[in-house]
Image: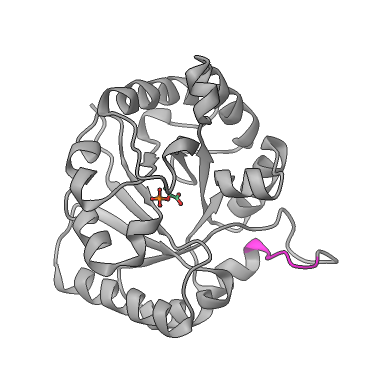
Amino acid sequence: MTARRKLIAGNWKMNGLKADGLALASDLAGRLNGAGEVSFDLLVCPPFPLLFPVGDAIAGSALALGGQDCAAKNSGAHTGDVAPTMLVDAGCRYVILGHSERRADHGESDALIAAKAAAAHAQGLIAIVCVGETEAQRDAGQADAVVSGQLAGSIPAGATAANTVIAYEPVWAIGTGKTATPDDVAAMHAHIRAELDGKIADPAKAKILYGGSVKPGNAVELMAVENVDGALVGGAALKADDFWAIATSC
Ligand code: PEP
């Protein structure tokens, strides 16, 4: 079995002002630095305006920084967009792409997500590509097919286990308090791992995160599931105690 280091990623979504972000990130960086050798990588993805202050505050620590989205281009007449180069400038190593909230709220297509991921890769960023079915699609027995289609459309040419992480986030589990059962997670992560063959170089080494109402109370069980290589955490990533408890349950 290939050993893959766990990645615990916090998606702060549109939450927190500068003081909140600085306090949370500094707290986590301090815990990480004081913990010595740990078995996981820890990542925070604040809203765009907080990237520079948080990046400056955690510079030199083991806490990694990521964006929640990026454009497919590096400059130009794209009002409101943020370039991959700008994320790198702020100290980011990662970028979340294709989160279901962006797919739903901004109509992001698989093709756009693939273009964004390619642009992120070109700047040396690790793209966390999100996939996941809605409740109606799961109930209709379409979960595997939906996720296969998203993987086929959203992973760009040139993706490798080093520059791409997949996050499986069933839409019905995000922010709802409902989580997929460990058996369902195991089945979907095995399906995703098989689907990565031919889409990502070195697929056995690629990380597949689970996301959807991960909390301290269910993290031990979920992180122990085969092919679960970490978590993408929303609500529980806003509290240092909860996020740290999830990370240390790996
Ligand atoms: C997410 O935002 O990616 C997420 C999984 O949110 P939550 O943990 O709140 O369900």
Q: Residue at x 45, y 76 (%)?
A: 55
Quick one: which residue is furthest to the top in this view?
141
| Residue 73: percent from left, percent from top | 74, 57
In terms of image quadrants, where is residue 240?
A: bottom left
Q: Residue at x 53, y 15 (%)?
A: 140
The relative height of residue 31 versus residue 192 in the rendered view (above or below) is: below
| Residue 248: percent from left, percent from top | 17, 55
Does residue 202 belong to the magenta stretch? Answer: no
Does residue 81 belong to the magenta stretch? Answer: yes
Instruction: Decide if residue 210 is on the left or right side of residue 94.
Output: left
Q: Residue at x 42, y 49 (%)?
A: 175
| Residue 48: percent from left, percent from top | 57, 70
Instruction: Decide if residue 184 is on the left or right side of residue 225.
Output: right
Q: Nearer the viewer, residue 174 or 221?
A: 174
Question: Would you say residue 110 is visible in this rendering?
Answer: yes
| Magenta span main SS | loop
Q: Which region is colored magenta?
A: 79-84
